[in-house]
């Protein structure tokens, strides 16, 4: 048992955020964390229930998700199974042992059609299957586990995953001397997985009122401006970053263009001080 006397169960432990949560937990030892193996498919209610029953934790953290946005568009049944039914299975199993859930969600529940920050109670209007399935997952968790938390985040990155934007950009900058095109009309909140991991553990340590919260770095940035900062701090010539628009890079599924998640509600709880994206990037550079 950790110093706080709390046991938590983690689904999605091998993913980008799951890895960061395991590391943050190991660093503090306040919470005893058990990682559910990947062989437990969260869309399998019986397996989820057996995992939760055998550990009987006070908290269940769900980082497992189908995060491939185009893949979700091509395979809506799988996306709904993992991103909507999976959280439902977890929330029901948790509720049956008296555990609370922390469900990780996404800025993609919004359509990104405005240029001001979104608050938690602003209307959701996902533009693709991924966001639809994640919104359904939020609703399932809130329905089956009313004392749960939904933490919506945005543009996660970390050195433990090769599939995030800064890692890929730095690989490109390293692999040749030429220009690298980056979209300038897509806006989000660049957030290190380590920051969200600490925020998750802080919620467990001193839970605020249950509900939906935005939990990401403060301040929105375009992919282009972020790329310039990544290049500059990585010792590359920032002029190699060339502006293009998302129309130049059509994708299978739509992405919301402008989503700035307002974190005022989370910050007002005093549970954890979310940094600005600039401070987080400079502190946590890859
Ligand atoms: N990455 C971002 O920029 C971002 C932004 C906003 C919100 N989020 C949300 O943040 C959370 C964590 O994202 P992440 O970046 O850590 O994603 P990730 O690296 O793709 O990790 C997802 C994890 O879920 C596992 N998984 C997939 N399907 C599963 C299933 N059916 N049963 C059990 N496990 C399954 C994956 O395993 P395999 O790899 O073996 O399939 C992986 O370990 C997700 O809820 C995501 O929607 C992410």
Image (spheres, rainbow, N blue to C red):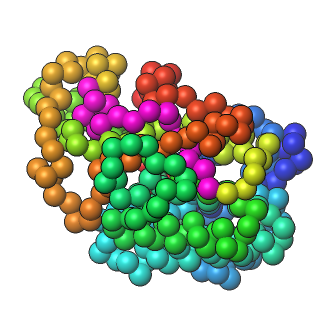
Where 47 sits versus 170, above or below? Answer: below
Viewer-side residue, 176 vs 52: 52
At x 68%, y 82%, the residue is 46
User: In which quadrant of the rendered view does residue 244 lie?
Assistant: top left
Where 87 sits versus 116, above or below? Answer: below
User: In which quadrant of the rendered view does residue 186 lie?
Assistant: top left
Could you say where residue 138 lies in the image, as x and y percent from the top left? 57, 66
From the viewer's perspective, tell me whether residue 132 is left or right of residue 250. Answer: right
Task: Kindly tell me whether residue 216 is visible in this rendering.
Answer: yes
Could you say where residue 188 lies in the image, as x and y percent from the top left? 38, 42
Viewer-side residue, 106 vs 83: 106
User: In which quadrant of the rendered view does residue 12 lie?
Assistant: bottom right
Viewer-side residue, 67 vs 129: 129
Number of marks in picture: 0
Task: Kindly tell me whether residue 192 is visible in this rendering.
Answer: no
At x 42%, y 39%, the residue is 189
From the viewer's perspective, tell me whether residue 23 is left or right of residue 186. Answer: right
From the viewer's perspective, tell me whether residue 146 is left or right of residue 223. Answer: right
Say whether residue 219 is magenta. Answer: yes
At x 24%, y 34%, the residue is 224
Where 70 sits versus 44, above or below? Answer: above
At x 84%, y 50%, the residue is 6
Residues in magenta, as a range:
212-228
Say whether residue 184 is magenta. Answer: no
Viewer-side residue, 147 vs 168: 147
Could you say where residue 237 lies in the image, as x and y percent from the top left? 19, 18
Q: Quadrant of the C terminus?
A: top left
């Amino acid at each position: 048992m950790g110093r706080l006397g709390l046991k938590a169960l983690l689904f999605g432990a091998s993913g980008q955020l799951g890895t960061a949560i395991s590391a943050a937990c190991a660093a503090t030892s306040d919470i005893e964390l058990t990682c559910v193996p990947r062989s437990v498919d969260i869309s399998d209610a019986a397996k989820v229930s057996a995992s939760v029953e055998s550990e009987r934790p006070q908290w269940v953290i769900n980082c497992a998700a189908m995060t491939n946005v185009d893949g979700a568009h091509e395979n809506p049944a799988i996306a709904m199974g993992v991103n909507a039914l999976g959280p439902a299975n977890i929330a029901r199993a948790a509720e049956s042992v008296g555990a609370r859930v922390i469900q990780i969600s996404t800025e993609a529940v919004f359509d990104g059609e405005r240029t001001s920050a979104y608050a938690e109670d602003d209307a959701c209007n996902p533009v693709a299957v991924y966001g639809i399935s994640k919104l359904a997952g939020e609703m399932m968790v809130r329905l089956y586990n009313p004392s749960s938390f939904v933490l919506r985040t945005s543009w996660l990155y970390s050195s433990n995953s090769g599939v995030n934007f800064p890692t890929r950009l730095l690989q490109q900058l390293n692999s040749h001397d030429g220009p690298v095109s980056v979209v300038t009309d897509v806006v989000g909140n660049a957030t290190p997985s380590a920051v969200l991991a600490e925020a998750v553990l802080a919620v467990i340590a001193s839970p605020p009122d249950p509900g939906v919260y935005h939990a990401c770095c403060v301040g929105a940035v375009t992919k282009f401006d972020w790329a310039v900062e990544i290049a500059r701090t990585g010792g590359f010539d920032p002029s190699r970053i060339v502006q293009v628009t998302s129309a130049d890079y059509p994708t299978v599924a739509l992405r919301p263009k402008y989503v700035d998640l307002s974190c005022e509600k989370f910050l007002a709880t005093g549970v954890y001080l979310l940094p600005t994206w600039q401070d987080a990037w400079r502190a946590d550079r890859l």
